Image: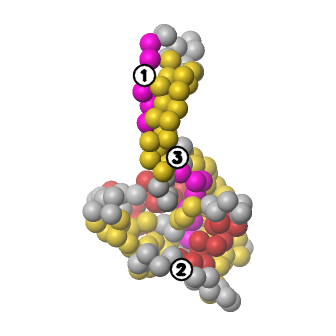
């Protein structure tokens, strides 16, 4: 069975500072047509940060899209002039003022492929220490840092206090690798 759709036309219907929206007219494998709306977004990185005390660092911040506070792992977009690894190190500095002696990529995924091409790489960051030189923070971000142990993080997923998908994925990853944060 063939699944591939053929794009007949595409048009940018919105160009913003963070995202672009494209409307496509496609021909489906059965030769019928459909319309697709795709949100284009730069690749992104997210970091599961585990301290020497075996706690994860999460950020509390207001998210306009949800109309409320969220608890999320540090994350951010990859700039055009950097690799994903460089973006991960930069975001750790900007958002937490920490650096990691070990920064390991453990997963990569599309955040919501039904409507966006945003591609994200998840890292585990351990061996955390204060940065020597602080990078400028984004002026529109108000971030509070919180530390959670594994049991509390899992409970907050189960009770709905943590609903951010990348953070849920990171916590489940940590749950299946409870040795994280123990330096050899």
| In the image, residue 77 above or below residue 22 | below
Q: Are marks 1 and 3 in contact (CB under 8 Å)?
A: no
Q: Who is closer to the viewer here, 163 or 39?
A: 39
| Place of residue 150 in the rendered image (x, y in percent of width and height, measured from the top left) | 45, 67
Mark 2, residue position: 137
The answer to which of marks 2 and 1 sits earlier in the sequence is 1
> Is residue 33 in the magenta section?
yes
Query: Disc 2 or disc 3, which is closer to the eye?
Result: 3
Q: Are marks 2 and 3 in contact (CB under 8 Å)?
A: no
| In the image, residue 11 above or below residue 33 | below
Q: Could you tell me which secondary element the residue under label 2 belongs to?
A: loop
The alpha-carbon separation of the residues under discs 1 and 3 comes to 19 Å
Q: Could you tell me which secondary element the residue under label 1 belongs to?
A: strand
Residue 40 numbered tag = 3
Q: Who is closer to the viewer here, 146 or 8?
A: 8
Mark 1, residue position: 34
The residue at 50%/18% (across/down) is 27
What is the crowding at mark 3: few (fewer than 14 residues within 10 Å), some, or many (at least 20)?
Answer: some
> Is residue 182 in the magenta section?
no
Quarter of the image for the N terminus: give it.
top right
| Place of residue 158 in the rendered image (x, y in percent of width and height, measured from the top left) | 33, 56
Residue 21 visible to the viewer: yes
Helix, strand or loop: magenta stretch: strand
Quadrant of the rendered image containing residue 145: bottom left
The residue at 66%/75% (across/down) is 100
| Residue 177 relative to residue 60: left or right | right
| Place of residue 131 in the rendered image (x, y in percent of width and height, measured from the top left) | 65, 86
The residue range painted magenta reads 32-49
| In the image, residue 9 above or below residue 126 | above
């Amino acid at each position: 069975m063939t699944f591939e759709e053929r794009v007949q036309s595409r048009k940018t219907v919105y160009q913003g500072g963070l995202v672009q929206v494209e409307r496509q007219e496609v021909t489906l494998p059965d030769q019928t047509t459909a319309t697709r709306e795709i949100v284009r977004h730069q690749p992104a990185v997210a970091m599961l940060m585990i301290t020497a005390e075996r706690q994860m660092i999460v950020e509390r911040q207001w998210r306009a899209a949800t109309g409320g506070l969220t608890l999320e792992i540090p994350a951010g977009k990859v700039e055009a002039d950097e690799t994903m690894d460089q973006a991960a190190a930069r975001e750790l500095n900007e958002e937490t003022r920490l650096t990691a002696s070990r920064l390991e990529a453990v997963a990569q995924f599309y955040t919501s492929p039904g409507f966006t091409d945003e591609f994200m790489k998840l890292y585990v960051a351990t061996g955390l220490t204060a940065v020597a030189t602080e990078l400028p923070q984004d002026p529109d971000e108000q971030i509070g840092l919180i530390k959670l142990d594994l049991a509390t993080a899992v409970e907050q997923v189960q009770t709905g206090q943590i609903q951010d998908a990348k953070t849920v994925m990171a916590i489940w990853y940590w749950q299946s690798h409870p040795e994280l944060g123990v330096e050899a």
